[in-house]
Image (cartoon, grey):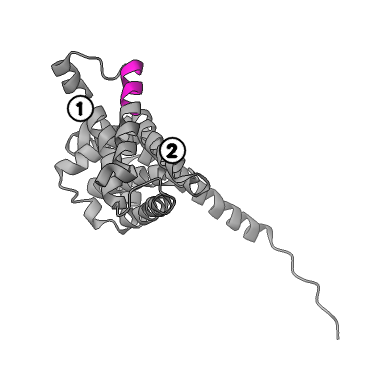
Amino acid sequence: MAVRAPRKPSLNSRSTRGGAATRQRNAERSRAAILAAATAQFAANGLGGARVDEIARSAGVNKALLYHYFGNKQALFLAVLEATYAQIRGAEATLELEALSPSAAMERLVDFTWNYFVQHPEFITLVNSENLHRAAHLKRSKRVRALHHPLVERIGEVLERGAACGEFRAGVDPVQLYISIASLGYFYLSNAHTLGAVFERDLLSPREREARRLHVQEVVHGYLRPDASS
């Protein structure tokens, strides 16, 4: 009985697969361009002030394609929020806190949070915008909630190690601690212009920003001291 030689893929099948891969890459590039343009527009103008026409123009796509990928303006705003949170949580995951002593790990987390807010002002303005809507969009997102579970676990592990070796007080809530760390930088930066006018300081100057970073470190360190709860 003759053995058939394996069939070689036809040019048409290779062409079809290549075409599908190209379409996929083009779709990914278009989605990324839309998200980048939407992030800039929502950060600059808020949800209400951002215009889909301008987002599409900046992304180099037509509105029909934007709606095809994201559905509507509200869904696009949620996609931007999810991507924004994914970026900061992803960056936090590279800090390798578990490889450091508890005190060094907490110092690294505090510095990272402060520096991230300084380097990514769009994060603050996007969160401000969502707060105006009482987190109506984030409440629909399972992805954002899932992104925060590892963060809480990592902070909790650092706190447990710190309490076990006597560097930190016991019984610290990791969620409350993270909210405090974030708020010490977030409030300062989001209100720097009004606070600067009131206190007649340029709170965004390099000198003032560095002073604030050190202050945040001192506040967190002081709270975590073993004798702080006595």
Q: How many marks?
A: 2
Asked if 103 appears above or below 114 in the picture, the reply is below
Split into 4 quadrants, where in the image is the N terminus? bottom right
- The span shown in magenta is 206-213
Residue 209 colored in magenta in the image: yes
Residue 68 image label:
none
In the rendered image, is residue 30 in sight?
Answer: no
User: In the image, 230: left or right of 7?
Assistant: left
Q: Residue at x 22, y 14 (%)?
A: 201
| SS at mark 2 in the image | helix
Type of amino acid at the residue the image marks with label 1: Asn
Q: Residue at x 34, y 45 (%)?
A: 85
Mark 2 is surrounded, within 10 Å at the Cα level, by few (under 14), some (14 to 19) or many (20 or more) other residues, namely some
In the rendered image, is residue 190 in sight?
Answer: yes
Pointer 2 residue: 108
Pointer 1 residue: 191
Residue 54 x %, y %:
28, 32
| SS at mark 1 in the image | loop
- Label the magenta part by its dominant secondary structure: helix
Residue 68 x %, y %:
33, 51
Mark 1 is surrounded, within 10 Å at the Cα level, by few (under 14), some (14 to 19) or many (20 or more) other residues, namely few
Type of amino acid at the residue the image marks with label 2: Arg
Compare marks 1 and 2 and give the one earlier in the sequence: 2
Would you identify the image quadrant in which residue 225 lies? Answer: top left
Report the residue that reaches farthest toward the right.
1
**Distance in Å between CA atoms under marks 1 and 2:** 24 Å
Residue 116 x %, y %:
38, 34
Depth check, front residue: 86 or 38: 86
Would you identify the image quadrant in which residue 106 lies? Answer: top left
Asked if 173 appears above or below 216 in the picture, the reply is below
